[in-house]
Image (cartoon, rainbow, N blue to C red):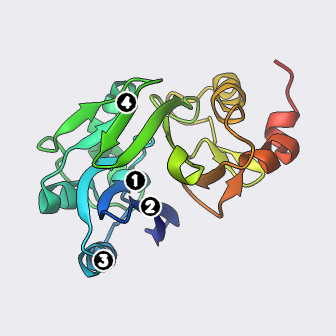
Amino acid sequence: MIKNFVFNHFAENTYLVFNKERDCVIIDPGNKVEAETLELETFIKDNNLKVHAILLTHPHLDHFCGVKELSEDYNVPVYMSKEGVKVFDNYIISAGVLGFPEKDFSTVEKRFLDYGSEVRFGDLSFKILDVSGHAPGSIAYYFKEEDAVFVGDAVFFESIGRTDLYGGDLDLLISNIRKNLFSLPVDTVIYSGHGPKTDVDYEAANNPYINGFDF
């Protein structure tokens, strides 16, 4: 089961993934203010969910500004790519400029994931896919049980993530989308970091940013 929340002034998608056994992970916690944290934690409490981990698709602050509170409240680590640590650790440099509270993330326990591996939390299993190009160390989490993939800002409905920020690489992003996302079953639902969900079949056929390039 998948529950979507839209948080902070970037309208970021935060996801809860859980099953009938109540195993749960939080993907990209963008809860910026107390009311957003309360909304998320109330849902977790009301549904008796057991939070095993926080998963980050990429280290942009609109996607992890709620990490500190949630990792402490549920005593769970944050899983991410090691390639994204530099951006993650430099959160405080751009936080104020972009309208986010300045926080110390040095105490957050981080665990690193390898591309191509699988990670399991209770009965929830995810395959780790490389979608770097929007940000260093970007990860997509393929959740085969529900034909879903959580891609962060790699792909949006008829669009892709911007590549003019630190570590961005347009050619790399397009290559990874074609190789690692569009190779998934065509009915796989794409859950993006912003905006509505879409699917592999539609984006492979209609995404103008992908189909407009030869490689």
Tag 1 and tag 2, C-beta contact below 8 Å: yes
Residue 19 located left or right of residue 192: left
Residue at mark 4 to residue at mark 3: CA–CA distance:
30 Å
Tag 2 and tag 3, C-beta contact below 8 Å: no
Res 208 visible? yes
Earlier residue among tags 1 and 2: 2
Q: Which numbered circle lies on residue 15?
A: 2
**Residue 213 lies in what quarter of the image?**
top right
Residue at mark 1 to residue at mark 2: CA–CA distance:
5 Å
Secondary structure of the residue carrying tag 1 is strand
Q: Which residue is mark 4?
A: 81
Earlier residue among tags 3 and 1: 1
Mark 3 against mark 1, which lies toward the viewer?
3
Res 56 visible? no
Secondary structure of the residue carrying tag 2 is strand
Q: Which numbered circle lies on residue 27?
A: 1
Q: Which quarter of the image is occupied by the C terminus?
A: top right
